[in-house]
Structure formats: structure tokens, C-alpha cells
Image (cartoon, rainbow, N blue to C red):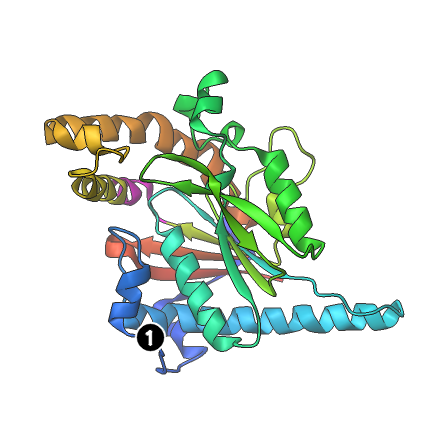
Amino acid sequence: MNEWMNYEQFDRQEWHSFFPTDTVRLSQDNLDEIKSLNDRISIEDVQDIYLPLIKLLQLRFQNHLEWQMQKANFLHQKSERVPYIIGIAGSVAVGKSTIARLLSILLNKLLPDKRVELMTTDGFLYPNAELKRRGLLDRKGFPESYDMEKLLRFMNDIEAGKAVVEAPTYSHQVYDVMPDQPLVIRQPDVLIVEGINTLQLPSSQQIYVSDYFDTSIYVDADAEQIEKWYLQRFGMLLDTALTDPDNYYYSYSQGPREEAFKMAKNVWQTIDLPNLTDYILPTRNRANIILHKTANHVVDRIYLKRG
């Protein structure tokens, strides 16, 4: 069955027409500060794509709050603070982090009296030492390389309204988790969860991370396009590592550049592309919203799940 039958499809112009405001309380400098290395985002993108998306998320959030109040009244209970959780999935190098940060900023502006938090699932990767012990270092990013039990426990604590929840963080500079630098999250009204595995079925649990999501977004692009972005980002990572011996990419930046790119292309072809094809892309039709990107990170199509 054609997976797109479950979605309504819109181009930029039609999507913008649903919320045709040009009021953007952000400058291009603001956008440049939040974008990832080789990503691209413009004021026009915010107007055409992300402000209508934020308006839709606001409507869904309001319905969420209303349902919590109605349920509490029906059960004769005190209304509890149940966070609204947004999941963002997609391939490596497709621009998930930039979109997550932008949505966080826009939601904070739209909902100034609400606490909006953002976290990434990268921190729930097993540490490199543990991956090496398990023989999974070359499978980093695949489903089995994540501590899914820990991630699901985190999601459960968030949904249950626990006062303080800590999430592990990850550094792309050192290419490992940072156990001594946790992200502390305190009872958010809205939580954005970003990562390649947010829509995947874990291998050993009976629950999806996405079971906790109120809205899920998949950032989509053709694999050939993502490979270009992946190699562009790798080149920029080499540039940033040139004078930093502690940076994971430092050793690659010191040798012949063509050799470094040969290694990166091999990593894409043997690790990231199979992961995309076998585990990430098959989860696309679990998303409520799909943002499709074309050259230069331009979103050209938006898919909204029916129902």
C-alpha cells in the first residue's frame, strides 16, 4: 500500500497560506546562531514553513490541555501537569537539531508562560567503551547501540511529572557521551525529543519511545542529498578540529584531506546509509508530520497525516 495515502500533501505556498503571517520575531543572526554546521535556514523558511507548523502545534497543545482538564473533571480528580511531548526523527545530517532548536525558540515565544525544554536521544547511546566491549562500535547509531531501557525510563519519568529528571548528553566533538554533564529537566509543559531513533521499535522492549509522543515529526530527504550534507558537515568538522587535539576529528584533520573524506564516505556507505535504509526510513510513516527537504536544506513539501 502507498504510505502517502495516509497523508495530505502541501507545497510551501499552500502551507504558508494556512497561517499567512509575516511577523517573525527573529533575525537572520538569530537563525544563524541555532543552525547546525552546514545547515541552512532563512526568515522566509520561518514564515513559509515553521510559523504555520508552530500554529498547528499550538492548536494541538491547547487540545491536550483541554483534554487533561476534562479527564480530571470526569474522574473527580485534581488536574495534573502532563507534558506535551514532540518527537523529531530523521537521518543523520538531515537537519533535525536545527529544526528542534528553532521550534523550541518559537514555542517559547508563543507560550511565554509555559516551560519548553529540548533534549536529544544521542546521550542515550552506550558510551564508546561499552560499545567496544559489546562489539558494537561499528554499529553506533543502530538500534542496539542505544540504552533503550534507560531512555524509556526517562520518558516515563517525564510523563509522570517527576520534579527533576536528568538526561545524559553527547558531544560530537569528543564523539562520546558526557556522563558528568547531564541535562536537568524540571517539569516541562512542552518537551521536544530529537534523535534518529525516536520512532523506532526497540529490540527488547514492548513499547516505542514514540508511544509517549503527542506529535511526531519526521525530517525527510533523498539519501543522495543527505550524503552530500553529511560530507559537507564532515569537512566543516575537520576545519573546527584543526587546532584542537582533544577533538575526535583532530587526527583526521592532520592528514591528507582526500584520505579523510574517503574514510567519511566509507562510514556513510557502510554504517549511516544502511541504518537509514533499514531502521530509520521505515519509521517515516509513523510520524504525524513529514517535512521533506530538497537541495540546500529547503523544505519543499509538507505531509500531514490524516485523522
In-front residue for pair 70/227: 70
Indicate left or right for 278 with 73 as reference. left
User: Where the C terminus falls, by quadrant?
Assistant: bottom right
Q: Inspect the magenta stretch and tell me whether residue 223 lies in it.
A: yes
User: Where the N terminus falls, by quadrant?
Assistant: top right
Indicate left or right for 183 with 44 as reference. right
| x then y, percent, for residue 110 | 49, 76
Indicate left or right for 33 with 107 as reference. left
Tell me which residue sits at (35%, 70%) in the image. 46
| x then y, percent, for residue 280 | 47, 39
Task: Look at the numbered disc 1 and give the secondary structure of its residue.
Answer: loop
Tell me if residue 261 can be seen.
Answer: no
Rendered image quadrant of residue 226: top left
Tell me which residue sits at (52%, 38%) in the image. 124
Tell me if residue 66 can be seen.
Answer: yes
Task: Label the magenta part by its dominant secondary structure.
Answer: helix
Residue where numbered disc 1 is placed: 26
Disc 1 residue type (three-letter) = Leu
Q: Inspect the magenta stretch and tell me whether residue 31 lies in it.
A: no
Tell me which residue sits at (49%, 57%) in the image. 118
Neighbor class of circle 1 (other Cα within 10 Å; few <14, some 14-19, many 20+) is: few
| x then y, percent, for residue 176 | 40, 34
In-front residue for pair 287/123: 123
Q: Is residue 85 above or below residue 135?
A: below
| x then y, percent, for residue 2 | 51, 47
Residues rendered magenta in the picture: 221-227
Indicate left or right for 223 with 202 as reference. left
How many dots with numbers? 1
Tell me which residue sits at (46%, 64%) in the image. 104
Q: Is residue 36 above or below residue 173?
A: below
In-front residue for pair 283/7: 283
Q: Is residue 147 above or below residue 75?
A: above
